[in-house]
Image (cartoon, helix red, strand yellow):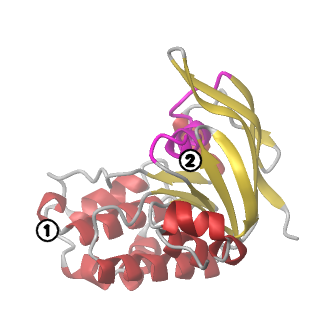
Amino acid sequence: MSDTVLEIKDLYVSYGGIEAVKGISIDVHEGKIVTLIGSNGAGKSTTLKSVAGLVKPKSGSIKYKGQELIGLSPDKIVSAGVVLVPEGRRVFPNLTVKENLRMGAYLRKDDLTADYEYVYELFPRLKEREWQLAGTLSGGEQQMLAVGRALMSKPELIMMDEPSLGLAPLVVQDIFKIIKTINKAGITVLLIEQNAFMALETADWAYVLETGEITHSREGLDLLEDNTIQEAYLGKSKA
C-alpha cells in the first residue's frame, strides 16, 4: 500500500446548528485516485472545502504529509501542494484563457513557460483559445480551464468537486481521461462526482458518504459491483 499523503481523522463540521460532517476518517494514499460518492447534502463538498481551508471544522484533524492543515490559510495549503478545483468551475469570465491560467500560478515566482505548454498539451482546445475570454467558452472548455488553472500551481494532490456536472456525455469521458492522465503523471487525486459509475470505475479507492457519515469504504470496482450501491447510486440492481 502506498504512503498516506492525506489523513482526515474524526472530522466534524457544522453550519450553524447543523452537523454536515459527523466524525469521518479518510485516508488518501500517494499516487492514487480516491473518490467520495453520495447524494446531495451528504457532506462531500464540505469535506473538500475543509481540506482546502475554506471551511473551519468544529473538531478533528486534517494532515497532509504529516502537517496539520486545520488553521492554515487557503494560500498556505496551496503552497503545501494541495489545490481544489471547485464545483461550478469558477473561471474568471472577463479574463482570457491564458490570464486564468496565470491566476492559478499566483503564488509562484519561477518561469511558467513549461507549465503553460503542459496544460496546452493536455487541453489542445485551450491553446486554440489562448486569448479568448473565459466567459465565452463552452461548459466543457471552462472545466478544462479550471483543471488547467489548478495544475499551474504544480500540486501534488488535486481535489475535484463535481468535474462532470452539467457536461455532455462525450465531454465527461474526456474529463475522466484527463483525470487518469494527470494521475499517471504522479498527481494524487481526491474526487467528488455525481456520476457514480464513472467515479467508481476510475477510482482506486472509494468512500460512500450518507448524511455526513461514511457507510462504505472499498476499492472502486468492488463498490461498482455492490448491489446496494447499484440500487442507491447507479439506478439499477443485478438482482
Pinpoint residue 78: horizontal percent, then vertical percent: 56, 47
Q: Report the magenta residues as a range.
A: 40-58
For residue 34, say whether it is visible.
no
| Point 45% across, 72% down: residue | 115
What SS does tag 2 mark? helix
Other residues around mark 2 within 10 Å, as few (<14) / some (14–19) / many (≥20):
many
35 or 143: which is nearer to us? 35
Q: Seen in the image, is 145 located left or right of residue 136?
A: right
Q: Amino acid at mark 2?
A: Val
> Can you tell which mark lies on residue 132?
1
Q: Seen in the image, is 47 located left or right of residue 2?
A: left
Q: Quadrant of residue 231?
A: bottom right
Residue at mark 2: 78
What SS does tag 1 mark? loop
208 or 190: which is nearer to us? 208
Q: Given the current orientation, which residue lies at the most extreme right position?
A: 1
Pinpoint residue 161: horizontal percent, then vertical percent: 46, 54
Q: Residue 57: within the magenta?
A: yes
Q: Amino acid at mark 1?
A: Gln
Pinpoint residue 153: horizontal percent, then vertical percent: 50, 58
How far apart are labels 1 and 2 at the CA level? 27 Å
